[in-house]
Amino acid sequence: MRIVIAGQTYHPEANGQAVFTTHLAEGLAQQGHEVMVVLPSERFKSYRTNNQGVRIEKVSALPISPNHTDIHITPFPQWRVQRLFKAFQPQLVHIQDHYPLSWSILQAARRNKLPVIGTNHFLPENLLRNLPVPAWGEKAAQRVLWRTMLLAYNHLDIVTTPTETAANILRQQAIRVPVHPISCGVDTNHFFPDVTVDREAMRRQYKLSPQKALFLYVGRLDHEKRLDVLLDAMHILQRDDLQLAIAGRGLHQKALQAKTAALSLNERVRFLGYVPAPDLPGLLNSADIFVMPSEAELQSIATLEAMATGRPILAANARALPELVENGLNGYLFRTNCAKDAAKRIQQLMEEQHRWPRMGLASLERVSNHSIENSVQQYEALYRKAVQLHANSRYNAKATPQTKKINNFY
C-alpha cells in the first residue's frame, strides 16, 4: 500500500508525536509498504530525504515566531502537495494534526477520493500553558481550540488516539467519526531491562550520585509537565539520600532552574539537558524510579519507555497516566498538581525500596502489549478497514457540500 503520513514533526525530534510518527512510518516500511512522510521544512525551502526506507518530503515553511524557531508553519503548501500526490499516487492518507500542512494534505486526499485517517495528539492545555491567556479566558480558548481541531477531524473516515482515556476526551467534544484507541507503542528492542549497563558509570557520566536513590524525569520542560510540583515535593522532603534528575529541554527550563536555586535544591536536583537517543536506555536502566508529573498526557511514550526498562513509576493521577500506573502494583499516582501528595508518595517509595524489583516486573508486564510491532499491525488492519469503508463511501460518487467546504477552507 502507498501511504502518505503528514504532520508537524518527525525524527530526530524527541517529542511524543515525532517518536510515534517515526516508529509508525519505519514500521510500515519494514512491512513492505511505500511510505511518504510530509512535513514542514526547517530550511525554509522544500527538499527530500530518505531514512530507513521512508521517503521524507519537507515542504517550504517559516518559523511560527522569532521565539519559536523550532516550530515551522507552511503558509501556502497546496501547490507542493499537489505535485507530491501526482508523483506518489497514494492509496491512503494518515494525518497527525490539524495544522495548515495537514489541512492541505486532507484537501488533496478528498480531491483524489482517498480514505483519510487522523491520529489525535492534541490537547488545548499543551498550547494554553505556553500562551499569554488569562485564567478567566482559558475555558473559552479551549472551546475555540477544540472547534478548530474538529473542523478537520470531523471530515476524516476514522480517528485514532493512543488510549481509551484519549478516545473518551474526543467523544466528549462531539467527534462525529469512529474513534479507535491504538497505543503509540514502544521500541522494546531499544528499551528493555539491560543487566549489562554499568549503572555507576552512567550516573557519573551525567554527574549523578551512585549512592543516592535516583528519581528520573525525561521529556519536554514545558509548563503543562508540572515539574514545579516535583521541585516543591523535593523541598518539602528535605532528604539527602535521594536525587531528582530532569532530562530534556523546553520553554519552562529557565524558570525551573531559577526555582531550583530559590529552593536551595541545586545539590539534590540536576538538569541533564538533552540526552542523546543512544544514552537514554542506559540512563533509564540506571534510575530507580521514573517520574511523570504532567497534567496533560494522552499516553506518555516516555513513561512507556521507562516501563519497558522495568522501572517503577511515580505519576500524576491525570488524563491517561492511570491507564499505565496502578497504585501499589507498578508504582504510585499522586493528586495532580499537589506537591504535598507527591512528597508523600516519594516518601512511601523510599520506605518500600524492597518492593522496587516487583514493581519493575509489574511495569514490564503492563507494557508487554505496547510494542511497536503490535501497534503497526493494528494500524495495518485499520488501514485495510478504511480502504474498504471508503470504497462504499459518498466520496467515491461526487463532491459533497462537506468536501467543498474543506477544499475552500484555505
Image: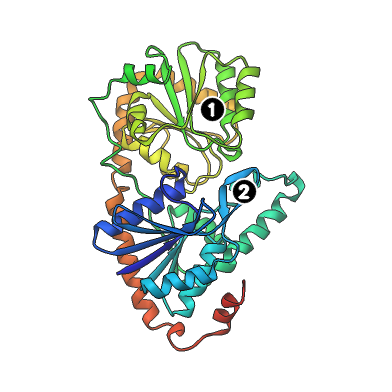
Residue at the image position 34 percent from the left and 72 percent from the top: 385
Q: How many marks?
A: 2
Residue 38 picture quarter: bottom left
* Image location (x, y in percent) of residue 302: 42, 39
Residue named by callout 2: 127
Q: Is residue 29 visible?
A: yes
Residue at the farthest bottom position: 397
> What colour scheme does the image use?
rainbow
Of callouts 2 and 1, which one flags the residue occurring earlier in the amino acid sequence? 2
In the displayed structure image, the side of residue 76 where residue 270 appears, left or right = left
Q: Which mark is residue 79?
A: none
- Residue 115 in sight from this viewpoint: no
| Residue 130 position (above or below residue 259) | below
Amino acid type, label 2: Leu
Residue 159 or 346: which is nearer the viewer?
159
Helix, strand or loop for disc 1: helix
Residue 342, disc: 1
At 42% across and 72% down in the image, what residue appears? Answer: 85
Residue count near mark 1 (Cα–Cα under 10 Å), binned few <14, some 14–19, many ≥20: many
- Mark 2 vs mark 1, foreground winner is 2
Please name the residue shown 34% across and 21% down the image: 202
Q: Is residue 377 above or below residue 330?
A: below
Q: Looking at the image, which is closer to me, 399 or 40?
A: 40
Residue 3 position in % (x across, y down): 36, 67
Q: State the image coordinates of residue 335 (x, y, percent, origin top left).
A: 56, 34
For the C terminus, the quadrant is: bottom right
The N terminus - image quarter: bottom left
Q: CA distance from mark 2 to mark 1?
A: 25 Å
Mark 2, Cα crowd under 10 Å, few <14 / some 14-19 / many 20+, is: some
